[in-house]
Image (cartoon, rainbow, N blue to C red):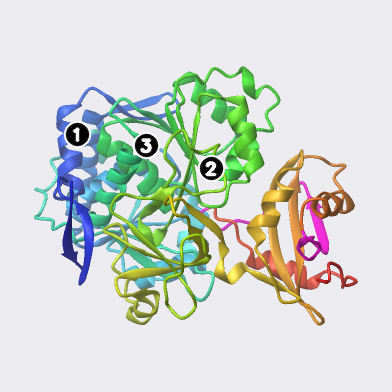
């Protein structure tokens, strides 16, 4: 049952029957399922009783260092049991998680510390060198391998009583990729996280007996609000993957009889390169969710062919939407491979033109997104908040359409669109075509200025086929695309494409590389 409610000065549809806050639900799970396994990391297993006791000890340690309700606590840990312990400890204190990507450098950390002003930092020893180089490091700094941390884990220290926590209270600060200017701290709330978890549960039919393979970084919104919190709040099992290695991932999936995994498309593409993929016994795996980037339709088809009983479920969202804004209903992923699913139950997406007017069904425009999962704004950044949110809707910058049946299709990022001789070229379309070639692991399309035709199309391809040539890729495209969409240059390499600290593809360095390439003769001139 849903009802309209007012939150953050906005009116939105909400689930009427929901927990009062994240801790209320999590405490219930740990109390009712003490002997069930919560986390698996290698040979280590944590039950919900273990997680309750150990997170309480860590919460007591933090409280003894002055951390309380509303204080920010920064965490820089790899995927593993320590990250889960830390997140749960912060939740039970009513503190605010500041999730830091493990690839963050000292200058980035300096910005995060100065902006969020965390009262404490929890990090693994391998990140100490970058932390040491950063500015504004919190005085309370806990190394997970220090004796103090391990003593806290082995003790039975009672955590302070959970303070009263309204659902509009902050849950976490997640810093966006910062494609322009400094990264912004999106303010995730208890209300948003609860609704994100409920959206995943309702759309995918998740239950308490699920086992998920935790591949995506926990500190990214997909990991935190797409895997960690939904499955903990279900009382399900998390199988941690500290580092993505395709054969090890398949072995974990088989050994632990996973039922669910959320991965980025590139991960599915890498799994397809395993020669004996079809020989793995993954009969319990029923949900293969993906998001973070468009999934090439050929990849969907190949994976569905390898595992016919597996439901391929696309999902679309952002840090600002606390994970999903759309989810593909199970069973429809292959038949609607060009869609990112339907709008989540309590969400709303308007497709708007450049003048801020809604366009007809099936027409491309910018996605404006509203709902209880949408963040109220950016931390300490009222100007950017005012520009990014209009009338209760977040302006996503993504271009796409919604058809008459309610299925959403994304074309591309508004800023990534290429203009070639007055014609629009959406990189995702060209990337989708190139991904259909055998041996392609990843592909990215960027634009480069052209003095005659505005821009030209440049392709960067990561391939396992050492014989792959620029000419072969261009001929493949020419047989399938209009001439103005065919890349003027193709850069083939065995190296992976650049990604930021959250694993998201970064096109900025590729654009710089494209600018340094030799000039080409004009190709693909529209008639």
Up/down of 216 relative to 273, above or below:
below
Up/down of 108 relative to 403, above or below:
below
Q: Nearer the viewer, mark 1 or mark 3?
A: 3
* Residue 447 picture quarter: bottom right
Q: Which residues are magenta?
A: 482-502
Image quarter of the C terminus: bottom right
Residue 428 visible somewhere in the drawing: yes
Report how far apart the C-alphas of labels 1 and 2 lie in the structure: 36 Å
Q: Which residue is more in the foreground, 324 or 155?
A: 324
Report how far apart the C-alphas of labels 2 and 3 lie in the structure: 16 Å
Q: Secondary structure at mark 2?
A: loop
**Residue 490 falls inside the magenta stretch:** yes
Write down the residue under mark 3: 204
Residue 496 visible somewhere in the drawing: no
The circle on residue 336 is 2
Q: Secondary structure at mark 3?
A: helix
Residue at the image position 43 percent from the left and 35 percent from the top: 330
Q: Nearer the viewer, mark 2 or mark 3?
A: 2
Report how far apart the C-alphas of labels 1 and 3 lie in the structure: 20 Å
**Residue 336 falls inside the magenta stretch:** no
Left or right: residue 345 compared with residue 218: left
Up/down of 125 relative to 44, above or below:
below
Write down the residue under mark 1: 29
Give neighbour class at mark 2: few <14, some 14-19, many 20+ (Cα, 10 Å): some
Residue at the image position 52 percent from the left and 61 percent from the top: 400
Left or right: residue 465 compared with residue 313: right
Per the picture, the main secondary structure of the magenta-coloured stretch is: loop
Residue 372, image x, y percentages: 26, 58
Residue 63, image x, y percentages: 18, 53
**Precedes in sequence: disc 1 or disc 2:** 1
**Precedes in sequence: disc 1 or disc 3:** 1
Give neighbour class at mark 3: few <14, some 14-19, many 20+ (Cα, 10 Å): some
């Amino acid at each position: 049952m849903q009802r309209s409610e007012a939150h953050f000065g906005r009116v939105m549809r909400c689930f009427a029957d929901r927990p009062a806050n994240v801790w209320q639900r999590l405490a219930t799970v740990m109390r009712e399922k003490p002997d069930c396994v919560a986390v698996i990391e290698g040979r280590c297993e944590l039950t919900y009783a273990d997680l309750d006791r150990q997170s309480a000890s860590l919460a007591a340690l933090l409280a003894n260092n002055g951390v309380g309700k509303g204080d920010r606590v920064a965490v820089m840990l790899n995927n593993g049991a320590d990250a889960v312990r830390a997140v749960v400890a912060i939740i039970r204190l009513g503190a605010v998680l500041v999730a830091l990507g493990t690839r963050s450098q000292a200058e980035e950390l300096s910005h995060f510390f100065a902006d969020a002003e965390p009262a404490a930092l929890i990090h693994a020893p391998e990140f100490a060198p970058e932390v040491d180089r950063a500015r504004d490091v919190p005085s309370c700094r806990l190394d997970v391998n220090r004796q103090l941390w391990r003593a806290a884990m082995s003790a039975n220290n009672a955590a302070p009583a959970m303070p009263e926590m309204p659902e509009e209270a902050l849950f976490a600060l997640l810093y966006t990729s910062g494609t322009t200017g400094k990264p912004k701290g999106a303010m995730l709330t208890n209300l948003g996280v609860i609704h994100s978890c409920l959206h995943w549960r309702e759309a995918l039919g998740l239950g308490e007996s699920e086992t998920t393979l935790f591949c995506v970084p926990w500190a990214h919104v997909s990991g935190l609000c797409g895997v960690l919190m939904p499955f903990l709040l279900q009382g399900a099992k998390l199988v941690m993957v500290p580092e993505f290695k395709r054969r090890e991932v398949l072995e974990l999936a088989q050994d632990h009889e996973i039922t669910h995994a959320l991965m980025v498309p590139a991960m599915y593409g890498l799994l397809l390169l395993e020669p004996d993929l079809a020989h793995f016994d993954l009969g319990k795996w029923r949900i293969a969710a993906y998001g973070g980037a468009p999934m090439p339709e050929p990849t969907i088809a190949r994976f569905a062919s390898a595992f016919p009983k597996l439901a391929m479920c696309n999902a679309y969202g952002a840090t600002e939407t606390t994970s999903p804004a759309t989810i593909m209903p199970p069973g429809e992923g292959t038949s609607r491979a060009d869609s990112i699913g339907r709008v989540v139950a309590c969400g709303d997406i308007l497709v708007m033109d450049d003048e801020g007017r809604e366009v007809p069904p099936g027409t491309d425009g910018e996605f404006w997104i509203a709902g209880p999962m949408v963040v109220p704004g950016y931390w300490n950044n009222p100007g950017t908040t005012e520009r990014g949110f209009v009338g209760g809707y977040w302006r996503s910058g993504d271009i796409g359409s919604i058809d008459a049946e309610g299925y959403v299709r994304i074309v591309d990022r508004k800023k990534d669109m290429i203009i070639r001789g007055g014609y629009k070229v959406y990189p995702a379309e060209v990337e989708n075509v190139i991904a259909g070639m055998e041996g392609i692991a990843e592909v990215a399309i960027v634009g480069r200025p052209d003095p005659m035709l505005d821009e030209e199309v440049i392709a960067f391809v990561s391939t396992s086929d050492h014989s792959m040539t620029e000419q072969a890729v261009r001929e493949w495209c020419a047989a399938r695309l209009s001439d103005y969409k065919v890349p003027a240059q193709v850069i083939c390499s065995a190296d992976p494409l650049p990604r930021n600290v959250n694993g998201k593809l970064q096109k900025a360095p590729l654009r710089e590389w494209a600018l340094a390439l030799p000039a080409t003769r004009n190709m693909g001139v529209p008639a």
